[in-house]
């Protein structure tokens, strides 16, 4: 694999899964600040086109290099580490469909957990110990009450997807404890990301039937699906439908910038964070009907919905307590529910078929999901256990990059493939 040479004395942030929904929005925010980025993504459920658009949205500030590499291909991943000196890593890469994870749990454990182990060993080997992990509120499992959830709540994920997140969190805590005063690890537990960039240029482009409420609502609004199924209307909530904490995707992306700033402050003070968890949520609960009615305002007409039975195990209300993020990260969600719906509708109308339907620009197609049979032939390479790792002082992650530097986009192909999410009929809201 040919990897372009980059200066070794300039700080670079590694972003795994940077072409995905959350990753691409975070890339825009980081590039706009002039950051130097290396993106690693296998494109199993994302599109390279999102990165092209992210560069444009950031007005070509900062710089970006892209590698099509699977984290399960340890040798291809190490080639990237050999050619870049990383000051921090934001780890988004992974499979994320709750329903599908119950159908192919081995694929989820292999991709999410093993891929992360490969990544962490290389970070140790190449002395990069500033790490931000894309976790999830699913690690909390069923809340014990309707009170907002704090980070010290008990953990107990209820499905394979959530358990991969919970197990990775445990691994990260063990790694931080194994090397005291070496690691700065932040676990960002997302609640329900919604919306799109306000330009309508990038957004969520799910393969198959969407797993989450609002992408499904948007597809009903655009005419791709006939009606919204509302699962249960007899919860102990204001209108009987489930209440959840929704957060605008741009607010969520800015939460990652705030986490990087937190690590930067810790490093500048010659201190160490160890491993710390933070909720990224609005702290406000919106019901399913709230979201449908608000989206109807964005669309300009009432959207059809059908009440169906509750799902087993569902609870009435799940809301974040984001006060720790406000205090420690200086971050809070700022955009409204109407912003979420307006921006989602703008993305949906400008891109009715996702990244496969654009006008006036290059239009690489979104990769077709692999079949489940790929699990039996997936080439997985594991790194040997590292017995000796460099232990040298960290440098600050703050980059000093000329904002006028032209961004570059390089593609290095790897033969590795990964199980990709397929159609999922377990859509429940």
Image (tube, rainbow, N blue to C red):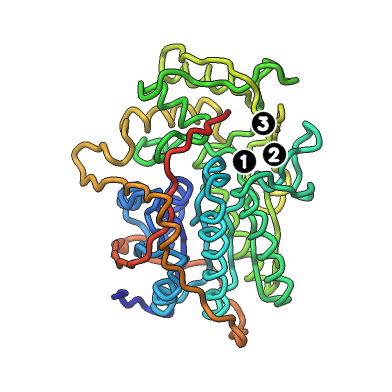
Residue at far top of view: 302
Nearest to N terminus: mark 3 or mark 2:
3
Q: Position of residue 99 (x, y in %)?
A: 55, 40
Q: Nearer the viewer, residue 112 or 186?
A: 112
In the rendered structure, find residue 284 and report the number of the disc placed on it: 3
User: Could you say which disc has been placed on residue 320 in the image?
Assistant: 2
Instruction: Tell me, yes or no, whether the two marked residues, 2 and 1, touch with CB atoms within 8 Å.
Output: yes
Q: Position of residue 172 (x, y in %)?
A: 66, 65
Seen in the image, is 242 located left or right of residue 336?
right
- Inter-mark Cα distance, 3 to 1: 11 Å
**What residue appears at the point 68 percent right and 30 percent down from the top-left corner?**
312
Given the current orientation, which residue lies at the most extreme left position? 360
Q: CA distance from mark 2 to mark 1?
A: 7 Å
Residue 428 in view here: yes
**Which residue is at a point 71% across and 69% down the rendered structure image?**
174
| Residue on which the image places disc 1 | 191
Q: Nearer the viewer, mark 3 or mark 1?
A: 1
Neighbour tally class for label 2: few under 14, some 14-19, many 20 plus, Cα within 10 Å: many
Residue contact at pointers 3 and 1, CB within 8 angstroms = no
Name the foreground residue: 33 vs 236. Answer: 236
Q: Residue at x 47, y 25 (%)?
A: 217
Q: Is residue 151 left or right of residue 26?
A: right
Label 3 Cα neighbours within 10 Å, binned few <14 / some 14-19 / many ≥20: some
Secondary element type, mark 1: loop
Earlier sequence position, callout 2 versus callout 1: 1
């Amino acid at each position: 694999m040919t990897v372009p040479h980059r200066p070794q004395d300039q700080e670079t942030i590694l972003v795994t899964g940077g072409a995905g929904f959350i990753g691409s929005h975070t890339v825009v925010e980081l590039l706009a600040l002039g950051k130097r980025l290396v993106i690693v993504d296998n494109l199993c459920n994302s599109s390279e086109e999102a990165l092209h658009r992210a560069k444009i949205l950031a007005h070509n500030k900062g710089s970006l290099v892209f590698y099509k590499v699977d984290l399960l291909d340890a040798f291809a991943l190490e080639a990237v580490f050999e050619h870049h000196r990383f000051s921090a890593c934001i780890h988004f890469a992974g499979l994320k469909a709750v329903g599908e994870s119950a159908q192919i749990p081995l694929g989820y454990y292999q991709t999410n957990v093993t891929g992360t182990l490969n990544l962490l060993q290389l970070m140790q080997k190449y002395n990069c110990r500033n790490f931000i992990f894309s976790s999830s509120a699913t690690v909390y499992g069923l809340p014990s009450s309707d009170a907002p959830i704090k980070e010290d709540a008990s953990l107990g994920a209820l499905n394979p997807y959530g358990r991969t997140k919970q197990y990775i969190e445990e691994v990260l805590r063990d790694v931080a404890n194994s090397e005291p005063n070496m690691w700065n690890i932040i676990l960002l537990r997302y609640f329900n990301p919604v919306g799109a960039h306000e330009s309508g240029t990038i957004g969520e482009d799910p393969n198959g039937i969407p797993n989450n409420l609002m992408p499904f609502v948007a597809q009903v609004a655009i005419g791709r699906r006939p009606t919204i199924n509302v699962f249960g209307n007899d919860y102990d909530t204001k209108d009987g439908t489930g209440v959840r904490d929704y957060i605008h995707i741009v607010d969520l992306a800015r939460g990652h910038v705030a986490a990087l700033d937190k690590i930067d402050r810790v490093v500048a003070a010659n201190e160490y964070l160890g491993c710390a968890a933070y909720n990224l949520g609005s702290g406000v609960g919106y019901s399913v009907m709230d979201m449908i009615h608000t989206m109807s305002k964005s669309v300009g007409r009432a959207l059809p919905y059908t009440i169906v039975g509750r799902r087993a195990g569902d609870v009435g209300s799940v809301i974040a307590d984001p006060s720790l993020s406000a205090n420690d990260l200086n971050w809070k969600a700022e955009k409204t529910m109407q912003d979420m719906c307006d921006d989602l509708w703008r993305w949906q109308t400008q891109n009715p078929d996702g990244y496969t339907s654009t006008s006036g620009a290059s239009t690489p197609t979104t990769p077709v999901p692999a079949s489940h049979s790929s699990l039996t032939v997936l080439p997985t390479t594991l790194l040997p256990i590292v017995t000796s790792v460099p232990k040298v002082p960290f440098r600050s992650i703050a980059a000093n990059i000329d904002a006028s530097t032209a961004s570059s986009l390089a593609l290095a192909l790897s033969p590795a493939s990964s199980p990709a999410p397929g159609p999922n009929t377990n859509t429940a809201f």
